[in-house]
Image (cartoon, rainbow, N blue to C red):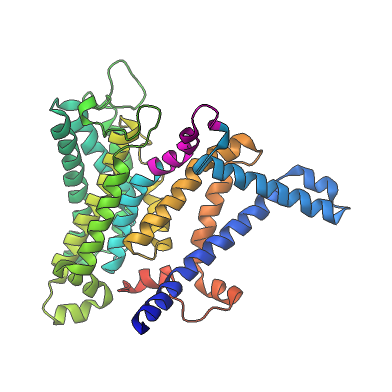
Amino acid sequence: MNKFKKYIEETSKSIALPLLAFFLAILSGGLLIAFSDPKIYKLWKSPLEFLGTGFASAGHAYLALIQGSIFDGNLTSKNFLLGFYPLSETFVVAAPLILTGLSVTLAFRAGLFNIGAQGQFIFGAIGASYVGFHYNLPPVIHALAAILGAIVLAGLWGGLVGFLKARTGAHEVIVTIMLNYISVYFLLWLLSTQTFLRKGRQDPIAPPVNENARLPKLFGMDYRINLGIFIALGVAYLIHILLSRTTWGFQFRSVGANTLAAKTAGMSVPFVMTSVMVICGALAGLGGAVQVMGSEYALTAGVAGSFGFDAITVALLGRAKPLGTVLAALLFGALRAGGLTMQANTTTPIDIVLVIQALVVLFIAAPAMVRAIFKLKNVKSGTDMAAKGWNG
C-alpha cells in the first residue's frame, strides 16, 4: 500500500509541471484571442461587456478547436460516427509526431540533445519515397521494404552524429543543427533530379508511391487515419521495454545519468552514443515513412513540415518518457488538426495555435516561474531532465 501511495505521489509530481505549463499556455492563448477581437475595444467603457465579449471570443475559438480535433456534431446528420472524423485527423497528425518525439526522448535519456530529428525525418521520407515509387513489389513486402529503406537511411544519418560525438567530441546540438540544413537543401536538390522529379512537373514533387507501398486505411476511404498510428504506438511500447527492461536500455540511462560512472563500470560510452543516435535517427525516419506512406503519398519539399522541431516540445512536455511523449504528441496533433477549424469558424488566426505551442515551451523552459506562480516544491522539469540526462 505504501509503495502504491509513493508511486501515486511520484506520478503526480511528474505530471504536475507539464499540465500546469499547458494550462498557463491555454490561459495566455485565450487572452491573446480575446484581445485580438476588435469588438472588445468598442466596449472598454463597459467593463462587464468588455470581459464578457473577451471570454466569449476565447470560448468560441476553443470550442472550434475541439470540434476540429475531437468531435464535430455538425457532421453527424448522416452518420453519428462521422462526427469523430476530426479525431481521426488528430491521429493522422500525431502518428509521425509520436515517432519523431520518441527520437528526441531516447536521446534525452542517454544525455544527448537530438535537434536533428527534422533532418532524420527528411531522410526517412526520402528512403520510403524512393522504394515506394521505384520498385513494384507485392503489397505487404513493398510496404515493409519502404519502411526498411527509411529506417536504414535515417539511422545512418543519425548515427553520423553519434559517431562524431563519440570520436571527436563534436557537440551533438551544433552537428544536428548543421545537418538539418544539409538535409533540407539536399532534398531540394534531389527533387530537381530526373530520378525524383515527377514526369511532366516543374515544381519539386516526386512520383507518387505505389498502391502496394501505402499504409492501409483503417476505416475506409472517407477517413485518412491509417496503420501509422498503431505503428507509432507499438514502437513507443518497444522503446519503453528497451529503456526499462533491457541491459542496452540500462546502459543508455547510465550514460545519460553519469558518463564517467558508466565508463568506470566498464560500459563503452562511444558505442552507447553512436547506437543511441542510430536508433534516434531510425525513429525519426520511421516518422517520415509514415508521413509519406500513410497520408502524403509523395515526397515534396515541405514533407517534414515542422515535425522535427515540434518533437522537441513533445519530448519535453512528455518528460522524456514514452507514454508522456505519446500523450504530448496526441495533444499537439489535436492543436494542429483543430487549428484549421478554429480559423474557419471564427476570426481567430491559425497562428494562435503556434503561439500556444510556443508558450508551452516557454513555461516548461521556465520551471522556476511556474513553481512560483503555483507555489510548487520539489517538482522536476523537462529542462532539468534534458540537462542531466534524467534517469527517472
Q: Is residue 101 visible?
A: yes
Residue 91 shown in magenta? yes
- Between residues 112 and 285, which one lies in front from this camera angle? 285
The residue lying at 25 percent from left, 78 percent from top is: 258
For the C terminus, the image quarter is bottom left
In the rendered image, which quarter is residue 387 located in? bottom left
Vertical order, 259 against 305 (above or below): below
Vertical order, 364 against 81 (above or below): below
Q: In this view, does 109 lie to the left or right of 305?
A: left
- Between residues 93 and 88, which one lies in front from this camera angle? 88
Magenta portion: prevailing SS class: helix
Question: Residue 133: x and y, percent?
Answer: 21, 27
In the rendered image, which quarter is residue 124 located in? top left
- Between residues 67 and 104, which one lies in front from this camera angle? 67
Question: Residue 379: x and y, percent?
Answer: 46, 77
Residue 263 shown in magenta? no
Residue closest to the far right: 45
Residue closest to the far bottom: 2
Residue closest to the far top: 200
Q: Is residue 29 left or right of residue 52?
A: left
The residue lying at 34 percent from left, 54 percent from top is: 101
Q: Is residue 35 visible?
A: no
Question: Residue 307: x and y, percent?
Answer: 38, 47
The residue lying at 21 percent from left, 42 percent from top is: 150
The magenta span reads 75-92
Q: In this view, does 340 lie to the left or right of 34?
A: left
